[in-house]
Image: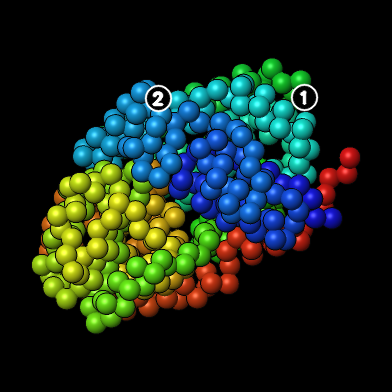
Amino acid sequence: MKPERIVLVSPPFSSHLHPMIALARAFSAHAGETFVACSESFREQITSSGVGFLPLMVNRNANTGIAQSTDQPDEEKDRLDEFLQSTYHGPVETLIVQSRHRKKDMLPDPEGLRRDIQRINERMRPDLWVVNQLSYGVTLAMYCLGLRFVTFCLPHPSTIPAGNALFGVPVHWPAAFKPNPDSLARLTRAAMQVKREFTEEFNRIVASCESTPERIENAFRLTSDEAILFNYPDFRNETTLDSIPRRIFMGSCFQKQNLPEKWKMRIAAAEHNRPRVLMAFGTFLSFRTDVIVRCIEAVKENFPESFLVVAAGSGMGELEKYADSQTVIEDYIPQKGLIGFMDVVIHHGGNNTFTEALFHGKPMLIFPFSSDQFDIASDAEEQGVGKVLDPNSFGGEDVRNALLTLLEEEGVAAKMWGRRLSKLGPHYAVQALIGRIEKRKP
């Protein structure tokens, strides 16, 4: 039988919530009554999408659209500022800062979170939970309470480390990055320390659970033993519906977006402008206006007939002076609706933008800064769907050459993957999942 009541749990970040809502809508269409549990600030977004809302604070830090303008405690703002400043010092320093912040960012109050989830479970009695892989306290609560859940891995699949890999250390580096052995050794030590801290905390809590589940060997590998849904293309033929846990690669997970009338008019007015370039550095990394400015200048200088759309985010005040009849710069753009009209996408390697661009068959120029962005950028190179530059050392000529190559190749590989991804998505994933699970009997 299909699960009749499903609860999806999301941390309070826009970039995580939007795929969660898309997946929730698919569960609502193909299974049963569906709810998204998240912080109160996202209630309207969730309920307006046609699914139920449950209040649950997964993290203290938050991002309601533009990270720097989100209202949150001073301690969270200080950590965000330290992270953003670290990006000027290169990938290893950035990843080490992220490792140092990991426990406060991702495991702030696991015991309180477990109590909150237990109360929701007693009141709602869901047949199935869906847990964001990066919400480690939620996964731990599921494990301790013995609840039935599936894991939703929104970032790169390497977020669930395999073999000797460590969470927080890229499995593959793009060609533009060559960290020296000493730097990599420092990063590895930092990641190993975080692994120990997380796993010790997990096992401390596990030992206090009434059900006394087995000890955990690696907190970052704890997932559902039923299914893992990946918001990512299956580049390496890893979809295994009959394995335990089932691995389902949905390719992308977003809701299609209709363009407002003013954007339709802008696109129509740029009918003869080529190339059409969309530039978006995400809700956090739009902070790096120095990188965005160099990209704007390189596009304008080398492609004078181009049509350029820039998501400025928190950098709007610094970037708006670059706007003209062929350059649209706004703090927020309807990205999902625009990508299909573009020729190429310039971005930071975030998984949402990467999978949205690939769904539409658009080649990419990627500037990775942090997190899983290096693995994503490496995949883009390997699959021939993108070029990668170091955001701290590139020049205008590098942008010109990369874009010329992408445009001359006409995005052949990206279009091929776009055709594949068009057959997948959240509805495919939910149908693949519920076709093989039975409702747990009381």
Measure how far apart labels 1 and 2 are at the Cα level.
35 Å
Residue at 27%, 68% (x, y): give it: 277
Q: Nearer the viewer, residue 200 or 101?
A: 101
Q: Is residue 265 above or below residue 188?
A: below
In this view of the protein, can residue 295 be seen by the observer?
A: yes
Indicate the position of residue 246 as horizontal and vertical percent values: 67, 54
Q: Considering the numbered disc 1 on the image, is that residue within a helix, a strand or a loop?
A: loop
Residue 28 picture quarter = bottom right
Residue at 16%, 76% (x, y): give it: 305
Q: How many marks?
A: 2
Q: Is residue 169 left or right of residue 2?
A: left
Indicate the position of residue 400 as horizontal and vertical percent values: 16, 67
**Picture disc at residue 73:** 2
Q: Nearer the viewer, residue 32 or 344?
A: 32
Q: Amino acid type of disc 2?
A: Pro
For mark 1, what is the residue? 211
Q: Nearer the viewer, residue 246 or 262?
A: 262
Q: Nearer the viewer, mark 1 or mark 2?
A: 2
Which comes sooner in the sequence, label 1 or label 2?
2
